[in-house]
């Protein structure tokens, strides 16, 4: 039973039994991974991209340092950065999950087509002054960022296209080009990966400090941080950010991390509500982006294939498109919106995380802002009953 409790379960995802099998294979193969990685780091015999060694009068120590640098730092063929997969000819990731290539240690979302299309732009109605202040601060931040990046949010109709070409609409700022979309998305995703890690870190430290359990919040928050980082890495495979964008990312992280850290430390409820309000805006922006692509307004992305990293992460079919990827990203943002609004409605000190054992179906996460505290309690209860029932069924069969 303890292994069931430790496994996050997604509605619409694999069965409990299959999860148990996948979990076992992960444990076994993780141990087998180390010798493979060690072999590749020490011998260099299987390095895919290592340049041919050049004779040099360097000392043995310097040569050894060079070899280490080559083994550890050489980036693979993709622009999202170095990965241990790049170091070996064998597909190590296939060993981690026997079903599909690409192994992630944290739970990752899998969507059907109807899940992806069920996401809606929804907003939680503010209930008090604090809610209004948070929503106001998010809208103000958005307004400033829109001005800075030249995003007008115009919804281009066939009428617009009768008088202006796509190029002309881009010049007036009514339409974002593929590069302009990427610039905006990369900056925002680099910021979006911060809150989950800050919340997870602070709750982890609290658990250590008070010598008590956390109620399952940490895992969900770290999953969110990982998920946002995967968004960033996915878009990095199609983008080439300028030094200006990189400088902005650096400055933005420095400011936002510290502000969010202090906010979470003082009032975690406010921090979760703030993230949820940000995610409401993210769903709105990605919905606009999806509409533009579907209407052929970003011709560079017509039938553009999905990057491999995205196919692996979201377990997409090999012929998935970039549009499918952006729909999956939007569904993730809707989940963050739902989870953070729901967490903000809880007692931050005493309630356990209702989504520690599983999350509601994607249509629910994508179409309502969040659960009230009572709805969370009911959902957690139902999930627990379902898992207990599945565990009993498993016992009977074995
Ligand atoms: Fe994101
Ligand atoms: Fe998000």
Image: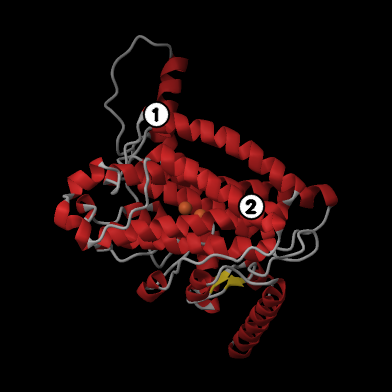
Residue drawn at x 19%, y 44% is 168
Q: Residues within 10 Å of mark 2 (few under 14, many from 20)?
A: many
Q: Examine the rendered structure and indicate whether residue 177 appears above or below residue 57.
A: below
Quadrant (top left, top right, bottom left, bottom right) of the N terminus: bottom right
**Apparent side of residue 28 relative to residue 214 in the rendered image (left or right):** left
Is 29 in front, or is 365? 365
Q: Nearer the viewer, residue 21 or 127?
A: 127
Q: CA distance from mark 1 to mark 2?
A: 29 Å
> Is residue 312 visible to us here?
no
Image-quadrant location for residue 171: top left
Identify which residue, 59 or 216, lies in the foreground. Answer: 216
Give me the residue at 43% from left, 11% from top: 59
The CB of the residue at mark 2 lies under 8 Å from ligand 2: no
User: If you read the primary sequence from the N terminus, does the residue marked by circle 1 or circle 2 appear first?
Assistant: 2
Residue beneath disc 1: 244
Tell me the quarter of the image containing the C terminus.
Answer: bottom right
Q: Residue furthest right?
A: 210
Give the residue drawn at x 54%, y 72%.
Answer: 368
Q: Is residue 202 visible?
A: yes
Q: Looking at this view, name the residue that lies furthest to the top.
A: 57
Q: Which residue is mark 2?
A: 134
Mark 1 Cα within 10 Å, few/some/many (few <14, many 20+)?
few
Measured as percent of width and height from the top left, residue 15 is found at 51, 78
| Looking at the image, residue 59 lies above or below residue 68 | above
Quadrant of res 111: bottom left
Q: How many numbered marks appear?
A: 2
Asked whether the residues under the numbered discs 1 and 2 touch, taking CB atoms below 8 Å apart as contact, a structural biologist would say no
Q: What's the mark number on residue 375?
A: none
């Amino acid at each position: 039973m303890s292994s069931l409790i430790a496994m996050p379960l997604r509605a619409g995802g694999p069965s409990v039994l299959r999860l148990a099998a996948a979990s076992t294979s992960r444990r076994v193969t993780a141990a087998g991974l180390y010798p493979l990685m060690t072999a590749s780091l020490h011998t260099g015999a299987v390095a895919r991209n290592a340049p041919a060694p050049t004779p040099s009068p360097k000392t043995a120590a310097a040569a050894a340092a060079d070899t280490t640098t080559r083994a550890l730092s050489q980036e693979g063929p993709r622009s999202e950065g170095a990965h241990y997969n790049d170091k070996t000819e064998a597909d190590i990731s296939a060993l981690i999950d026997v079903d599909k290539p690409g192994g992630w240690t944290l739970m990752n979302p899998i969507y059907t087509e109807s899940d992806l299309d069920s996401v809606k732009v929804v907003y939680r109605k503010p209930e008090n002054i604090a809610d209004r202040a948070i929503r106001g601060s998010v809208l103000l931040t958005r307004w400033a960022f829109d001005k800075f990046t030249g995003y007008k949010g115009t919804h281009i109709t066939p009428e617009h296209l009768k008088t202006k070409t796509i190029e002309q609409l881009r010049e007036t700022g009514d339409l974002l080009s593929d590069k302009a979309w990427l610039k905006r998305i990369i900056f925002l995703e680099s910021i979006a990966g911060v809150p989950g890690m800050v919340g997870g870190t602070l709750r982890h430290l609290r658990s250590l400090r008070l010598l008590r359990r956390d109620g399952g919040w940490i895992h969900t928050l770290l999953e969110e941080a990982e998920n946002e980082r995967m968004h960033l890495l996915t878009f990095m495979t199609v983008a080439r950010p300028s030094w200006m964008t990189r400088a902005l990312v650096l400055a933005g992280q420095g400011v936002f991390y510290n502000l969010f850290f202090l906010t979470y430390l003082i009032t975690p409820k406010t921090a979760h509500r703030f993230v949820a309000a940000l995610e409401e805006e993210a769903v709105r922006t990605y919905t606009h982006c999806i509409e533009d692509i579907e209407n052929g307004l970003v011709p560079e992305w017509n039938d553009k294939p999905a990057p491999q990293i995205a196919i692996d992460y979201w377990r997409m079919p090999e012929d998935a498109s970039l549009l499918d990827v952006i729909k999956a990203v939007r569904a993730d943002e809707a989940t963050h919106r739902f989870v953070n609004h729901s967490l903000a409605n809880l007692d931050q000190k005493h309630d356990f995380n209702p989504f520690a054992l599983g999350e509601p179906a994607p249509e629910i996460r994508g179409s309502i802002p969040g659960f009230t505290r009572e709805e969370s309690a009911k959902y957690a209860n139902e999930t627990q009953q379902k898992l207990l029932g599945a565990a009993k069924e498993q016992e009977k069969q074995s």
